[in-house]
Image (spheres, rainbow, N blue to C red):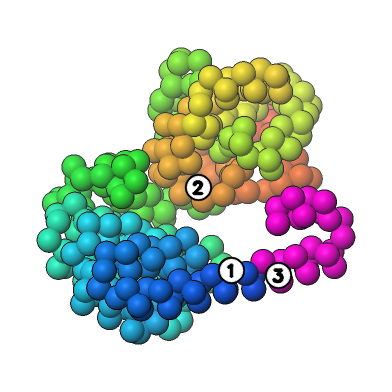
Amino acid sequence: MYEDLGTFSKDDNKISELNTEFRKFVNAQAEALRILINQLAKAPAAFEGILIYAGKFSYPLTDDLVDLVLEDHLANPKMGQLCFDLRDRIQSGENWAERIIRKTAAKHPDLAVRGQAHYALGDMYHRYRAQPCHGKITEADEAKYLAQATEYYTEVVKNYAGFLSPDGGFKLGDKAAAELVRIKNLPNLKVGKSALDIVGKDMAGQPLRLSDYRGKVVMVVFWGTWCGPCMREVPHEQALLKKHEGKPFVILGVNSDKDLGAAVKISAEKQITWPSWFDGGSTDGPIQTAYNVRQWPTIYVLDPQGVIRYIDVRDEKLDEAVEELLAKESIKTAITEFGY
């Protein structure tokens, strides 16, 4: 299938036909799996099937399957994985997902799994309800969801901090604490607010602090070499630096690559000469989390006083933003020099 998509990449009709065939194939596999789950019912293999059906296939669970999970498989040691898989199920009529996570958080015999369920509830309310990727919600609903997320993350920090995520990738307490910082920072990540200071080390291991660049227009770019749009922006960023050479303007990056060595190598090849913080080797690093970065690249443009003036402007609008801030700073400097 993937080879066919490559072969017919410029034939829209063929691509549509292949996608239709693929959906039919997946639907047939999912239906066969659903039947098998019902046949196996209480057997451990039935829960493995549910992990595939609801997790990897992302199919909603019918009422009978939800009852099967809660009545016969609630104590399964992999319930934490199912809870993590269901975090984003917030569409209308999908209360079944929250029902499973909540009961796991309250009743699972393993404290680690209960902690994973509490963390999943925090993510459900914060990442997917309070700040949906698509659509908007009212300020009142956002505040309500963030308050609920704060409650669950705080519970994780208090009672489940040392337990790991289902994949073993992070400690629940560390990540929950970072998410609490993100929520606390949200009101300040807006135009007109002072930018949060960033303190850390650059990709060469040297100290780097955002507040040391006060007095300059600063463009903070959250990027990674893995990110195609990020790398396509590099020539534009280089042109901006060249155009404003000698002026109080700098670019600072926040890098999200897993492999520091590879990131340094590619940066040298692409002539990315400006400093970047190395943010923990993932897109969930502490700097990106504190700045609520959810897409790459994300760009903040700060005035010389460290106030956020633009967020995610691109192309000509980015050029105009930098020029406007530099012009204002030039006028301020001239007024100061002439004593007005």
Residue that mark 3 sits on = 21
Q: Is residue 37 magenta-colored?
A: no
The local crowd at label 1, few if under 14, some if 14 to 19, many if 20 or more residues have their Cα within 10 Å, is few
Residue ID at (50%, 15%): 204
The answer to whether residue 226 is above or below residue 93 is above
| Disc nearest the viewer among 3 and 2 | 3
Q: In which quarter of the image is the N terminus?
A: bottom right
Q: What element carries label 1?
A: helix
Q: In which quarter of the image is the C terminus?
A: top right
Residue ID at (29%, 75%): 41
Residue 156 position in % (x across, y down)? 21, 53
Q: Is residue 335 left or right of residue 40?
A: right
Residue ID at (36%, 78%): 38
Magenta-colored segment: predominant secondary structure: helix
Residue interval drawn in magenta: 1-22
Inspect the image, locate mark 1, and give the three-letter code of the amino acid beneath it: Val
Q: In which quarter of the image is residue 79?
A: bottom left
Residue that mark 1 sits on = 26
Inspect the image, locate mark 3, and give the three-letter code of the amino acid beneath it: Glu
Residue 78 position in % (x across, y down)? 27, 57
Q: Is mark 3 on a helix, strand or loop?
A: helix
Residue ID at (14%, 54%): 111
The residue closer to the viewer here, 21 or 256, is 21
The answer to whether residue 266 is above or below residue 321 is above
Residue that mark 2 sits on = 293
Instruction: Looking at the image, tell me whether mark 3 or mark 2 is earlier in sequence order.
Output: 3
